[in-house]
Image (cartoon, rainbow, N blue to C red):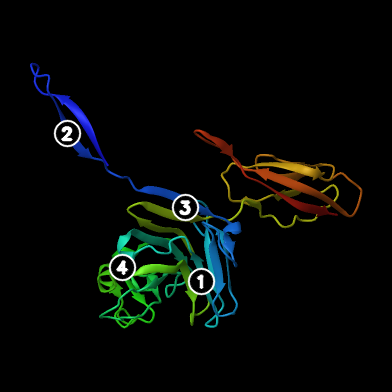
Amino acid sequence: MRRSISVGVGAALATMVSLAIPSVAMAATSTVVVSSANLVTGSPAQGDFVTINQSGGLGGVGLAFGPSSPPLGSGSLQINVTGAADHWSVYNYDHIGTRLSDLTSLGYSTYSDNTTTAPILQVEINPGNTTGTDAGVTYSTLNFEPYLQSPGLTTGKWQSWNVFAGVVWGTHLTGAPNSTPLSWASFVATYPNATIKGGFGVNVGGNWSAMTGNADALTIGTAAQTTTYDFEAPFQVTTTSLPNATIRTAYSATLMANGGTSPYKWSIVSGSLPKGLHLNRATGAISGTPATSDSGAYTFTVGVVDKKIKVKHQPPTQHSATKVLSISF
């Protein structure tokens, strides 16, 4: 698109000249929050990730709080394998047809419990060569493995990876085997017509030893659109049980929650605490000295809400959660 601006030339001249100035298109950016509802095993909707048990083994995929301080929000995607027989992939299918040469960003962050392995960024591609290197190969998984990159893996620490600054390799490709991975620029030069033909996401396992790894801030972008996926565990009460109480003996326990935005506010939604015990709405502490002479269990439902977030021109957001608990004598 070109737009015209009219300017006067000289005080005595009435003639106007038109300057044609090309407009500059700005790339759109978006952050997609991936919740438990977006981890599916069947046909995915926009923004969903399909979890695939590649080997039928053990281990699993889920959303976790932390660990430590994830790059986005308070949660991350967590994948674990129990041994060499386990193999999991977590794929999004919203970017099929994108040419690798059109990508302007590709990266993610990982956290691992060891220095040998961490979740791999993986893309199912059609290498696209009709002549020359690997001509006729129509399927490959492009792999970015953190342990192959500089400065290597650090246990118990979030690390951010820019695929364009590292090395990659592809299955079924003689021109880019895992024994001699290529820089991103060299890979695209070798396979200039390569396109995404399937899943884009992370992979764990396939002859790996037991490990737990996390991924977050998964990013893919072109000149037109950059999308970052933020994996977030649901806001929930994490207290699963409360200690028993003794009549006329001081009692203390604290309710806990994860997710959302602190500070939290607690309440008793239904039922009641034993006589003599009280809930601190701000801290979630249950304290006091039970005065009841009744035995058995007091069952009640606790509720918690997080801080209400106000966004300009949008309705405020606030999360809530409940949990049925009991105190026994």
Q: How far apart are marks 2 and 1 (CA)?
A: 54 Å
- Type of the residue with mark 3: Leu
- Type of the residue with mark 4: Gly
Image check: 191 left or right of 264? Answer: left
Q: Residues within 10 Å of mark 1 (few under 14, many from 20)?
A: many
Q: Distance between the residues labelled 3 and 4?
A: 22 Å
- Type of the residue with mark 1: Ser
Point out the residue furthest to the right here: 294
Q: Residue 22 placed where, x, y %?
A: 22, 41
- Location of mark 2 (residue): 19
Q: How far apart are marks 1 and 4 (CA)?
A: 21 Å
Q: Nearer the viewer, residue 290 or 325?
A: 325
- Location of mark 3 (residue): 72
Q: Nearer the viewer, residue 28 or 256?
A: 28
Evaluate whether residue 88 shows in this view: yes
Q: Distance between the residues labelled 1 and 3?
A: 21 Å
Q: Where residue 18 is drawn, which disc sits there? A: none
Q: How crowded is mark 3: few (under 14 residues within 10 Å), some or many (20 or more)?
A: some
Residues tagged 2 and 1 counted as in contact (Cβ below 8 A) = no
- Location of mark 1 (residue): 89
Q: Residue 172 placed where, x, y %?
A: 38, 82
Determine whether the residue tagged by mark 3 lies in a helix, strand or loop.
Answer: loop
Q: How crowded is mark 4: few (under 14 residues within 10 Å), some or many (20 or more)?
A: some
Q: Residue 21 placed where, x, y %?
A: 20, 38
Q: Residue 147 placed where, x, y %?
A: 38, 73
Q: Nearer the viewer, residue 318 or 243?
A: 318
Determine whether the residue tagged by mark 2 lies in a helix, strand or loop.
Answer: strand
Q: Residues within 10 Å of mark 2 (few under 14, many from 20)?
A: few
